[in-house]
């Protein structure tokens, strides 16, 4: 889980956002000569800005996927599903006693790690 504590370098993020804003503001200048209808010009600028700023917001959400926000990965839920599948497979192959030993071992480890 070292990836969880290793953020993306801030200078790269800062320069990326600065260049994105500059590019979006200057995008309208060369398009002004190419597009004849003003309505089409406004639509092109709107959708380009909407798309690129939307991608930036998605990148912000993906920067920290292990938190507790609504859009973050449900690591605890997924790991419990995998653990339950392993316990059921172990019970069908090795029996109930082996499954219970596994449960005790995992529960002891999870108690020690949470402290």
Image (cartoon, rainbow, N blue to C red):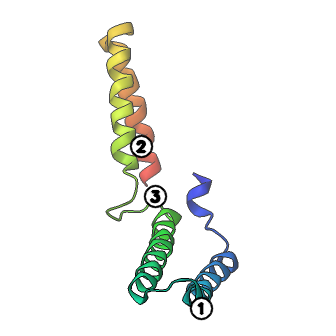
Label 3 near label 1: C-beta < 8 Å? no
Q: To which residue does mark 1 refer?
A: 29
Query: Image point 46% across, 84% down: which residue?
Result: 41
**Depth order, front residue of 25/21:** 25
Of callouts 1 and 2, the N-terminal one:
1
Percent across and percent down for residue 8 are 63, 68
Residue sticking out furthest to the front: 36
Q: To which residue does mark 2 refer?
A: 110
Asked if 65 appears above or below 20 in the picture, the reply is above
Label 2 near label 1: C-beta < 8 Å? no
Mark 2 or mark 3, which is nearer to you?
3
- Residue at disc 1, secondary structure: helix
Of callouts 2 and 3, the N-terminal one:
3
Label 3 near label 2: C-beta < 8 Å? no
Asked if 3 appears above or below 55 in the picture, the reply is above
Determine which quarter of the picture holds residue 84.
top left
Percent across and percent down for residue 46 are 42, 81
Going by the image, does 107 lie left or right of 14?
left
Instruction: Please rate how many residues cluster around mark 2, counting C-alpha atoms within 10 Å: few if below 14, some from 14 to 19, many from 20.
Output: few
| Distance CA(mark 1)–CA(mark 2) | 59 Å
**Depth order, front residue of 50/70:** 50
Q: To which residue does mark 3 refer?
A: 66
- Residue at disc 2, secondary structure: helix
Query: Image point 42% across, 89% down: which residue?
Result: 38
User: On residue 108, which mark appears?
Assistant: none
Percent across and percent down for residue 71 are 36, 61
């Amino acid at each position: 889980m070292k990836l969880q504590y290793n953020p993306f370098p801030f200078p790269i993020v800062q320069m990326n956002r600065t260049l994105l804003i500059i590019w979006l503001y200057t995008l309208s200048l060369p398009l002004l000569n190419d597009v004849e209808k003003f309505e089409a010009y406004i639509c092109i600028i709107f959708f380009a800005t909407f798309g690129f700023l939307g991608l930036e917001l998605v990148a912000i959400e993906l920067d920290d996927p292990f938190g507790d926000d609504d859009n973050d990965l449900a690591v605890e839920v997924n790991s419990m599903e995998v653990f339950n599948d392993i316990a059921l497979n172990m019970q069908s192959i090795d029996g109930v006693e082996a499954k219970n030993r596994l449960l005790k071992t995992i529960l002891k480890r999870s108690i020690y790690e949470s402290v």
